[in-house]
Image (tube, rainbow, N blue to C red):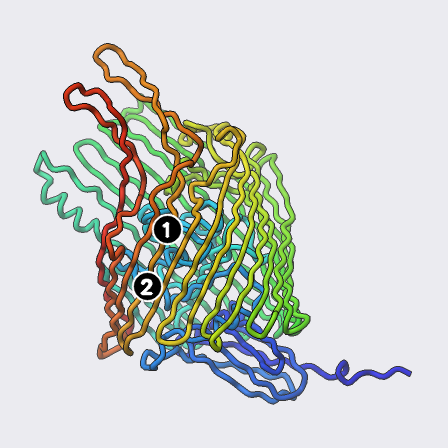
């Protein structure tokens, strides 16, 4: 005779709901939902939805989220229950700082590693260059993430280059995430809801880049009331408007930002236009514009429409010489969300994005134009299936059509007696399908595994590859977790650049029969520990990443107006490894973090350095960041950041060959270089300070933000050049002297921010 155990026969029920902001009614993504009785929990999805499967009984649910007050609810479950709730934002009038605990506990318990989540509230408190809050610069303060140097908004993640980062804005790709040649990013913090940076252990739904994914989500807009917010700073102003289209069912948000230095330079140029000795100042400005709308079609269907437009423009006019340079991004996404049941969700996104630059130069009656662009049209669908607390499945597919216009050159005279053009166009389709599962067999062990199949087809070239992903977490104790991950990635499009930094004129170029896809493998092992009753989280990760089909260029490579770029490339491999320490505090009047990275990054090419391994330009042995946020009173915050980085590697001539010219002409010198990148710039370090003083306007909220960039006036290296030294009497060259160029001294700034 067989009997059925009551434990197996017992019926299961679900506790589910949506967590929202009480003021705007926007869903909150990533809220930690934990049950002490079950010793397990979950996070709210990108729609704010959560679900737990339980047996009949009484349970306590704890809801916690950075910047919001934690809530605890006790429920007796005898049937399926729906608990929707609003998490109250942490009031400025509380005695504690704005940011509360909650996120640290979730970081400890998740199997995901090598992920950084940026709080917009934290970012807005940090001191910034010219007072402009910058998301990318805030991410550069995390371990394993480096800047390209002074004033750069690029990311160099675990030994990867700037083209190995995937920037997503509501699912649409942003190809150049920088304004002002890298000094600012294109992401307006007033319009951003959340930012997640993946630098390893990538979930299966992400692909196409080797080093990182920066997933940026825009705010949805206030469904209850109209509001406005913005700020006025030294070089830029911004304004955001949001409100309901139909109260409780639909909303909109529009946000714009513009610099206005060009207004002053134009006035100066006009005032001095009649002075023949006056050299006009180039006009420069950038702007960006974000918009998003959403509509609740029904209880099961929602539609989201978002868009971005941004441009940088430089103009110069002077006696027959005209120069115009502009570059920018466009992106848009239409997403349909459908709930088949409390356990099955569908998100389908149609996206379009593009990046282009254009340089026009006119001298007298002759003009030339250089341009390049890339356009994408994509479709992806993602399914989430939550059968119970032990499994969380995610699977889907995507396809992107790329159109490349590479190095287009047009030149000619006004009378058309001279006319020529050059350049190439390419098209390709990138595609992928994936499946993944987060499996929790016990409260102490979680396994996240998945497989992605990706491919790229352009003309006769067809590439395919499998990308396995696995991450695991094991709880050694209640407050200590051991984590490990392995990821394989493929990258089918590449950024063509012969400079040391990412520039607007860099060209995106597809894989083909000569240029093979880049590939990488990355393994990581880490340990996380909570201490002091959950106030501090200490993590330590070691990683090793090896990269295949890395790209460099021949000496003297011609990248502009070249119809055969394939002949300019060199191919090799790379490796990067290191150790990242991170101590974070998110509770109390004083919060912040300390990060330290010890790392090595190398490249190897048969044609460079006699085939020997050499340090990559951004091989940085030591990287330190300290971030402190302190609430002195209810209205006054002090903030400070200090960064230190070993000097970038670079090559210098060790000798010069003298070439004599014709009689009467000066001699010329041909530099002779030693091993590639065998010298180092001076170390980089900088202290930034800030004060946020909250005002008491009659309506709404307002504050004054004071910041001091580079407080002790450190002259950090931007680049090195060599000055030729000559004897004043004989004019004979006696040697060459290295000179350092620096950008920013100590720069104070003040910004007025408001919301009503």
> Which quadrant is the N terminus positioned in?
bottom right
- Say which quarter of the image contains residue 134: bottom left
Give the alpha-carbon distance from disc 2 to disc 1, as whole Å: 16 Å
Q: Residue furthest top?
A: 663
- Mark 2 vs mark 1: give the one in front: 2
Nearer the observer, 395 or 242: 395
- Say which quarter of the image contains residue 379: bottom right
Neighbourhood count class around disc 2 (C-alpha, 10 Å): few under 14, some 14–19, many 20 upward: many
- Is any atom of residue 628 visible in this view? yes
Neighbourhood count class around disc 1 (C-alpha, 10 Å): few under 14, some 14–19, many 20 upward: many
Nearer the observer, 727 or 496: 727
In the image, what residue occupies the spot 62% across and 39% down?
462
Measured from the top left, where is residue 423 in percent x and y? 43, 31
Measured from the top left, where is residue 223 in percent x and y? 41, 74
Tell me the residue that label 2 is attached to. Answer: 126
Nearest to N terminus: mark 2 or mark 1: 2
695, above or below 449, in the image: below
- Say which quarter of the image contains residue 435: bottom right
Dot label at residue 153: 1
Q: Secondary structure at mark 2?
A: loop
Measured from the top left, where is residue 428 in percent x and y? 55, 41
User: Is 578 situated left or right of 372 in this image?
Assistant: right
In the image, what residue occupies the spot 8% across and 38% down?
274
């Amino acid at each position: 005779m067989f009997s059925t155990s009551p434990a197996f026969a017992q019926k299961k029920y679900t506790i589910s709901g949506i967590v929202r902001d009480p003021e705007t009614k926007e869903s909150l993504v990533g809220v930690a939902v934990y049950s002490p009785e079950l010793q397990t929990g979950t996070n709210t999805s990108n729609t704010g939805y959560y679900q737990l499967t339980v047996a009949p009984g009484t349970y306590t649910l704890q809801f916690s989220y950075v910047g919001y007050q934690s809530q605890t609810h006790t429920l007796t479950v005898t049937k399926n229950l729906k608990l929707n709730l609003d998490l109250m934002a942490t009031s400025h009038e509380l005695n504690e700082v704005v940011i509360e605990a909650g996120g640290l506990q979730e970081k400890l318990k998740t199997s995901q590693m090598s992920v950084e989540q940026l709080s917009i509230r934290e970012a807005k408190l940090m001191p910034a260059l010219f007072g402009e809050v910058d998301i990318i610069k805030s991410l550069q303060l995390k371990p394993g993430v480096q800047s390209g140097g002074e004033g750069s908004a690029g990311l160099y993640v675990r030994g990867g280059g700037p083209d190995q980062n995937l920037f997503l804005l509501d699912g649409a790709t942003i190809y150049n995430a920088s304004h002002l040649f890298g000094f600012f990013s294109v992401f307006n913090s007033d319009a951003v809801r959340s930012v997640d940076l993946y630098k390893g252990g990538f979930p299966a739904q992400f692909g196409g880049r080797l080093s990182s994914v920066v997933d940026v989500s825009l705010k949805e807009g206030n469904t209850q009331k109209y509001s406005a917010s913005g700020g006025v700073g030294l070089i830029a102003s911004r304004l955001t408007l949001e409100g309901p289209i139909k109260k409780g069912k639909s909303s909109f948000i529009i946000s714009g930002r513009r610099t206005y230095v060009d207004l002053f330079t134009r006035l100066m140029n006009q005032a001095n236009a009649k002075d023949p000795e006056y050299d006009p100042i180039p006009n420069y400005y950038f702007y960006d514009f974000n918009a998003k709308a959403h509509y609740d079609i029904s209880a099961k269907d929602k539609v989201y429409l978002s868009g971005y437009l941004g441009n940088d423009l430089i103009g110069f006019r002077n006696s027959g010489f005209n120069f115009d340079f502009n570059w920018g991004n466009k992106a848009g996404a239409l997403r349909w969300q459908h709930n088949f049941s409390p356990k099955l969700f569908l998100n389908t996104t149609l996206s379009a994005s593009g990046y282009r630059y254009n340089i026009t130069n006119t001298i007298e009656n002759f003009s030339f134009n250089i341009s390049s662009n890339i356009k994408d049209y994509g479709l992806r669908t993602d399914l989430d299936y939550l059968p119970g607390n032990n499994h969380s499945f995610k699977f889907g597919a995507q396809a992107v059509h790329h159109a490349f216009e590479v190095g287009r050159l047009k030149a000619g005279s006004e009378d058309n007696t001279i006319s020529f053009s050059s350049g190439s166009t390419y098209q390709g389709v990138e595609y992928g399908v994936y499946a993944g599962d987060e499996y929790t067999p016990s409260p102490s062990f979680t396994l996240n595994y998945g497989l992605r199949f990706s491919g790229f087809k352009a003309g006769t070239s067809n590439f395919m590859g499998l990308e396995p992903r696995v991450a695991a977490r094991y709880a050694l104790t209640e407050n200590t977790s051991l984590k490990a991950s392995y990821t394989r990635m493929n990258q089918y499009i590449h950024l063509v650049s012969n400079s040391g930094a990412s520039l607007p004129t860099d060209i995106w170029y597809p894989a083909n029969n000569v240029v093979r896809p880049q590939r990488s493998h990355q393994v990581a092992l880490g340990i996380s520990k909570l201490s002091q009753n959950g106030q501090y989280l200490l993590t330590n990760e070691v990683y090793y990443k090896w990269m295949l089909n890395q790209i460099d260029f021949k000496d003297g490579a011609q990248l502009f107006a070249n119809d055969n770029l394939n002949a300019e490339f060199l191919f090799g491999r790379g490796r990067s490894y290191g150790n990242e320490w991170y101590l974070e505090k998110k509770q109390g009047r004083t919060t912040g973090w300390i990060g330290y990275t010890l790392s090595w990054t190398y490249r190897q090419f048969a044609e460079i350095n006699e085939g020997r391994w050499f340090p990559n330009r951004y091989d940085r042995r030591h990287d330190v960041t300290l971030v402190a946020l302190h609430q002195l009173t209810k209205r006054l915050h002090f903030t400070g950041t200090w960064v230190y980085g070993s000097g970038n590697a670079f090559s210098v001539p060790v000798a010069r060959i003298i070439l004599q010219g014709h009689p009467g002409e000066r001699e010329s010198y041909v530099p002779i270089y030693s091993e590639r990148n065998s010298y180092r710039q001076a170390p980089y370090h900088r202290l930034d300070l800030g004060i946020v003083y909250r005002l008491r306007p009659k309506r709404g909220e307002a504050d004054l933000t004071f910041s001091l960039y580079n407080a002790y006036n450190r002259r950090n290296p931007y680049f090195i050049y060599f000055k030729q030294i000559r004897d004043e009497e004989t004019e004979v060259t006696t040697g060459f002297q290295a000179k350092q160029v620096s950008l920013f001294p100590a720069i104070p700034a003040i910004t007025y921010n408001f919301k009503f």
